[in-house]
């Protein structure tokens, strides 16, 4: 029997397979898992992190396409316990990966990570009140399980007619490396979301021509990526040992994002006017109507943040085309209506399949169906004891909620340790859920996704009011 405050780090042999004991198993060494490891260490809970890849970072290690970066202010996206200072608002993949590694090194997290260890299944036994996590490199037993596997799984690859006869290359950004160059080649980038908007200017630099082919337009907001004077001042004071200004900056940035989100959703006509004005002068009125005026209202889908995209469009380095693909020919893409786009390389920026639990999850030997499961405060699933899965919000920096929900889990675990409790859960029940935004990648998998409740999905408000620990709302044993 394991307790939350102490643990035997030895190996218990069950038959021929050693089961390694700890208090908490964390799945994934990405932004969520590393954050969870920090808080476990700070609260004195023994833990191990299981990571399928050969390095930490999650998405920021595996996704290496041209222009890969975070589209939230990184001073806000970085951890509250280790805010990152930079002269730039947004950071690219390499900088984010270096930041995450520096956090893992500074807080002695690296030695707790088991790399190249893929989780196959996790099973909770209500008699022993323990999890047993099976991997391709042995099994682990713990009292608690924190799942930080994110929500993106395999790439979403649409089916197109004629691809068998196409002599060029079709590659998804999931499999694309920024080191690749396309000299003398016509590149067509299919997509209109954040990935496409980030990648287009960078691909234009390494190809003969670059066409961004979108089925329908997106709202796009361009920034110059320079930190403001206020941001630089707060960062400078933070490096001199004054922590309060940085906390104010992070709170302001999140409140600003939430206010814009609510304002745009509440007053869509004003929001549409804002984006029309934002693009006036860059493109002609006809181009604005055809390529930059979506049929939906701002923030019904995530708004891509662009750097250098306006200039690339203005110069003609990036050509935007709005049409559906009818089929591929030998050396081109044929659009509905008959127009052909010369194409040597077709890059799909068509998103990912959503998969919140990327392994088999069982309770007392029965597989848990997570489709439509109630998901309390973005941290606990109905009927799954001692299980925490911190997730972010759709419209803002992931960490703004994932950190708050992780701290909420620590409050629960500390309460259990101090009261000699072994198990915590919430009941499984039907809840209504309307996503805060409705992008295609979310809506096509919506029936299979958990149903979030207990949160307004506005971190600036939720973090003040929604993550107060109230033991009476949870079931302890």
Image (cartoon, rainbow, N blue to C red):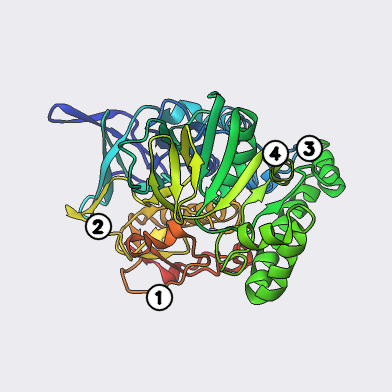
Residue 23 point in image, percent of width and height:
37, 42
Residue denoted by label 3: 87
Q: Secondary structure at mark 3?
A: loop
- Asked whether 393 or 366 is in front, the reply is 393
Query: What distance separates the C-alpha of mark 4 from that of mark 1?
Result: 37 Å
Looking at marks 3 and 1 on the same chain, the residue that comes earlier in the sequence is marked by: 3
Q: Are marks 3 and 1 in contact (CB under 8 Å)?
A: no
Q: Secondary structure at mark 1?
A: loop
Looking at marks 4 and 1 on the same chain, the residue that comes earlier in the sequence is marked by: 4
Frontmost of labels 2 and 3 is: 3
Residue 456 shown left or right of residue 433 in the figure: right
Residue 68 visible in the picture: no
Q: At x 72% / y 61%, what residue is drawn?
A: 285
Looking at marks 2 and 3 on the same chain, the residue that comes earlier in the sequence is marked by: 3
Looking at marks 2 and 1 on the same chain, the residue that comes earlier in the sequence is marked by: 2
For the N terminus, give its image quadrant: top left
Q: Secondary structure at mark 2?
A: loop
The numbered disc on residue 432 is: 1
Q: Are marks 2 and 1 in contact (CB under 8 Å)?
A: no
Q: Secondary structure at mark 4?
A: loop
Looking at marks 2 and 4 on the same chain, the residue that comes earlier in the sequence is marked by: 4
Query: What distance separates the C-alpha of mark 2 from that of mark 1?
Result: 20 Å
For the C terminus, give its image quadrant: bottom left
Q: At x 83% / y 42%, what residue is drawn?
A: 232
Residue denoted by label 4: 84
Residue denoted by label 2: 368
């Amino acid at each position: 029997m394991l307790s939350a405050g102490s643990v035997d780090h030895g190996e218990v042999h069950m038959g021929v397979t050693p089961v390694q004991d700890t208090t908490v198993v964390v799945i994934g060494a990405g932004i969520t898992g590393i954050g969870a490891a920090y808080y476990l260490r700070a609260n004195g809970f023994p833990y191990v992190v299981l990571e399928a890849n050969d390095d930490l970072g999650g998405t920021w290690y595996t996704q290496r396409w041209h222009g890969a970066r975070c589209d939230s202010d990184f001073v806000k996206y970085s951890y509250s316990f280790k805010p990152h200072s930079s002269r730039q608002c947004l950071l690219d993949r390499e900088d984010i990966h270096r930041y995450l590694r520096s956090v893992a090194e500074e807080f002695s997290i690296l030695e707790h990570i088991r790399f190249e260890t893929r989780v196959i299944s996790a099973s909770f036994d209500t008699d022993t009140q323990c999890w047993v996590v099976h991997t391709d490199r042995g099994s682990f037993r713990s009292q608690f399980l924190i799942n930080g596997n994110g929500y993106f799984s395999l790439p979403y690859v649409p089916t197109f007619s004629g691809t068998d006869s196409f002599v060029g290359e079709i590659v998804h950004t999931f499999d694309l490396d920024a080191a690749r160059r396309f000299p003398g080649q016509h590149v067509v980038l299919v997509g209109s979301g954040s990935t496409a908007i980030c990648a287009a200017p960078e691909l234009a630099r390494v190809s003969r021509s670059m066409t961004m082919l979108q089925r329908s337009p997106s709202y796009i907001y361009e920034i110059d990526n320079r930190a403001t004077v206020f941001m630089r001042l707060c960062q400078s004071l933070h490096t001199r040992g004054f922590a309060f200004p940085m906390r104010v900056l992070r709170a302001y940035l999140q409140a600003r994002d939430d206010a814009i989100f609510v304002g745009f959703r509440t007053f869509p006509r004003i929001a549409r006017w804002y984006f029309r004005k934002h693009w006036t002068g860059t493109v002609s009125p006809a181009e604005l109507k055809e390529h930059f005026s979506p049929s939906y209202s701002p923030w019904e889908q995530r708004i891509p943040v662009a750097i250098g995209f306006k200039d690339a469009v203005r110069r003609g380095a990036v050509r935007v085309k709005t049409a559906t693909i009818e089929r591929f020919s030998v050396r081109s893409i044929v659009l509905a209506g008959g127009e052909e786009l010369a194409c040597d390389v077709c890059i799909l920026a068509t998103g990912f399949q959503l998969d919140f639990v990327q392994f088999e999850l069982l309770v007392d030997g029965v597989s848990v169906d997570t489709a439509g499961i109630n998901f309390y405060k973005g941290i606990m699933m109905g009927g799954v004891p001692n299980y925490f899965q911190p997730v972010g919000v759709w419209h803002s920096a992931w960490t703004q909620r994932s950190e708050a929900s992780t701290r909420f889990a620590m409050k629960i675990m500390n309460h259990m340790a101090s009261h000699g409790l072994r198990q915590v859960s919430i009941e499984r029940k039907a809840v209504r859920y309307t996503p805060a935004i409705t992008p295609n990648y979310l809506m096509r998998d919506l029936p299979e996704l958990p149903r979030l409740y207990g949160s307004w999905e506005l971190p600036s408000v939720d973090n003040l009011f929604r993550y107060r620990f109230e033991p009476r709302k949870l079931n302890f044993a």
